[in-house]
Image (spheres, rainbow, N blue to C red):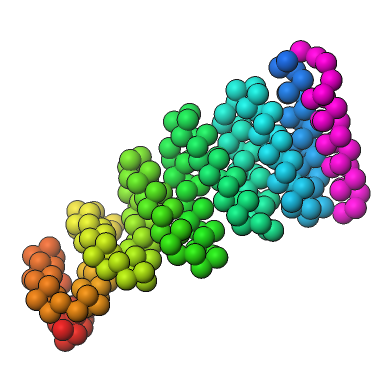
């Protein structure tokens, strides 16, 4: 591992030398990028995660000089994955930059994917307020790209965290929206009972008996089979 670390440092020195020396504008940054990439890989093999992350950011800068935004975005992702081992805040910052670059070049599905990854990092840190924000952003991006399954997965997370934060109305609206979408999709129909149960539990948490009664009537209209389920009976007894 020490050998990989020293190899990485040697590649990094060569890259810095390329940048500070004379040469054709394009080739200088291309050569440096190649060396930074090799350095970062060595640092990863040495499990020197902070060094790997910092080097990937230098690689991203080279790609930006070459106006290669896709490669720069990917370098930010690689930096984020290195920092994830040691520094969650830095990892989030790198993914945010990657998202901005993917948006610039119209790769919205990639942006959605990494917004979701940021949300998962915050969830892992028990920061549900920020997790909610990023799951919501990710859901919007997936929805715009018509990746319905991924959008709904993120929306369910938003609803879950909204309920934990006692934002019950927000949670209810999301579960009901997912229900309406799922009823028109044979692959998603199986989840309808669970979504209506979650919406109903949020109604119960609000403590408005009339609202719960109205909701149960509305849910029967949405899904006529719901009134024969255990989920319905639980909600009916609950209020």
The picture places residue 179, in percent across and down from the top left corner, at 22, 60
Q: Is residue 107 visible?
A: no
Q: Is residue 3 above or below residue 107?
A: below
Identity of the residue drawn at 55% across and 65% down: 125
Identity of the residue drawn at 60% across and 45% down: 94
Identity of the residue drawn at 86% across and 41% down: 9
The picture places residue 139, in percent across and down from the top left corner, at 37, 50
Q: Is residue 71 left or right of residue 44?
A: left
Report the front residue among 133 and 155: 133
Q: Is residue 31 visible?
A: yes
Q: Is residue 149 left or right of residue 199?
A: right
**Residue 11 lies within the magenta run:** yes
Report the front residue among 56 and 206: 206
Q: Is residue 115 above or below residue 36?
A: below
Q: Which residues are magenta?
A: 1-24
Identify the image quadrant of the N terminus: bottom right
Q: Residue furthest bottom?
A: 237
**Residue 43 lies within the magenta run:** no
Residue 86 figure quarter: bottom right
The picture places residue 88, in percent across and down from the top left corner, at 61, 57
Residue 215 figure quarter: bottom left
Q: Is residue 107 left or right of residue 164?
A: right
Identify the image quadrant of the C terminus: bottom left
Q: Is residue 50 left or right of residue 105?
A: right
The picture places residue 89, in percent across and down from the top left corner, at 60, 54
């Amino acid at each position: 591992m020490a050998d990989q670390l020293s190899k990485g440092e040697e590649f990094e020195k060569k890259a810095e030398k390329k940048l500070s020396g004379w040469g054709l504008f394009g080739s200088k940054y291309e050569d440096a990028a190649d060396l930074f990439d090799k350095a970062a890989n060595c640092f990863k093999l040495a499990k020197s995660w902070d060094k790997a992350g910092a080097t990937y950011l230098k690689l991203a800068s080279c790609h930006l000089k070459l106006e290669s935004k896709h490669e720069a975005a990917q370098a930010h992702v690689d930096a984020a994955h290195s920092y994830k081992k040691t520094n969650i805040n830095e990892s989030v910052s790198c993914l945010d930059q990657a998202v901005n670059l993917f948006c610039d070049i119209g790769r919205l599905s990639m942006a959605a994917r990494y917004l979701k990854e940021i949300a998962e990092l915050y969830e892992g840190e028990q920061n549900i307020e920020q997790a909610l924000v990023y799951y919501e952003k990710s859901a919007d991006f997936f929805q715009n790209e018509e990746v319905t399954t991924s959008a709904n997965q993120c929306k369910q997370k938003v609803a879950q965290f909204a309920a934990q934060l006692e934002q019950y109305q927000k949670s209810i609206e999301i579960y009901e929206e997912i229900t309406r979408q799922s009823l028109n999709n044979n692959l998603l129909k199986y989840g309808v009972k669970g979504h209506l149960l979650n919406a109903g539990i949020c109604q119960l948490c609000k403590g408005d008996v009339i609202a719960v009664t109205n909701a149960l009537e509305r849910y029967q209209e949405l899904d006529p089979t719901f009134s024969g389920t255990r989920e319905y009976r639980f909600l009916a007894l609950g209020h």
